[in-house]
Amino acid sequence: MGVINVTQIGGAFYGGVMRRPPAVVTVAGSDPSGGAGLQADLKTIGALGGYGMAVVTALTAQNTHGVDAVHAVPADFVAAQFDSLVTDVRIDAVKTGMLASAAVTDVVCEFVRSGLSRGTCVVVDPVMVSTSGHRLMAPDALDAMRRLVGCASIVTPNLAEAAALLGEAEAGDERAMVTQGRRLLDLGVGAVLMKGGHLAGDPVDVLISADTVERFAQQRVATRNTHGTGCALSAALATMHPQLGSWSQAVAAAKTWLTEALRQADRLEIGAGAGPVHHLHRWW
């Protein structure tokens, strides 16, 4: 795998695939501290040359120490947001994050199935529990999440999320990650990016499709400011795939950008807990 020069993305050059900024919709909850959720997604999309739009699924009260409260948006109002978008604007990619309830997840699933143009890439980040341990999805929404995964172009679970989707114990090594990734393909998803950051040592993510397994290794960055890394990675994938045309290239570009965002995170000095990554490190 050659190195993707992320500094070329987001201007006149789009990897020979797209000649205009991709229009990317994030379907996620709000984080008032700006480190995760739709605020982080919109920063990521803009930083990587996309035009970001948002469908709000939940409001949270949270900061760098954790989540204090969650207020879910009614499912019919989530549907209304989708309806307003598709009657007017083009959508090149969608990424989902916190969906909070089974009803909202089913609305998103129906939108993905029938409301998008053929070929629109759909990135599902199966957010269930925050880094601080706060549950972000109702327990009865797991089956709805499995249905949504089956409609996705790619799903990006961490080890706990993959285990929950499969009803199995968490993978304890890279081989088990690949095995579980292949089982997730049986849900109907086009590709799986298994995130191995919770294992010891330098983080390794594995991209798995029907005919390929590709390993992406990075040196672990020494910082406590990792809030919202999963949101940023999935938003980056949704922005990069329309520009580069393959999941392999999109993953390489997204991880290169995110690693530098982690390296630059300590410069921000936001909050006293686990702060955000520096989404806009290329610009300031």
Image: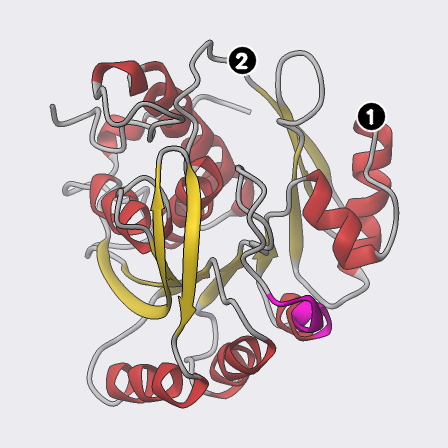
Crowding at label 1, few (<14), some or many (≥20) Cα neighbours within 10 Å? few
User: Residue 164: where, in percent of width, then height?
Assistant: 76, 54
User: Residue 263: where, in percent of width, then height?
Assistant: 35, 14
Which of 250/134 is in front?
134
Look at 37% across and 51% down and name the residue there.
Answer: 37
Mark drawn on residue 173: 1
Mostly what secondary structure, the magenta segment?
A: helix
Q: Is 85 on the left or on the right of 263, as rendered?
A: left
Secondary structure found at label 2: loop
Q: Is residue 201 above or below residue 66?
A: above
Mark 1 touches mark 2? (CB < 8 Å): no
Q: Is 283 on the left or on the right of 19, as rendered?
A: left
Q: Name the kind of residue labelled 2 in the image.
A: Arg
Q: Is 159 on the left or on the right of 151, as rendered?
A: right
Q: Is residue 115 above or below residue 203?
A: below
Look at 37% across and 55% down and name the residue there.
Answer: 242
Q: For mark 2, what is the residue?
A: 220
What is the span of residues highlighted in magenta in the rendered image?
A: 138-143
Look at 71% across and 39% down and name the residue there.
Answer: 159
Which of 247/154 is in front?
154
Secondary structure found at label 1: loop
Which of 268/241 is in front?
268
Q: Name the kind of residue labelled 1 in the image.
A: Asp
Q: Which of marks 1 and 2 is nearer the N terminus?
A: 1
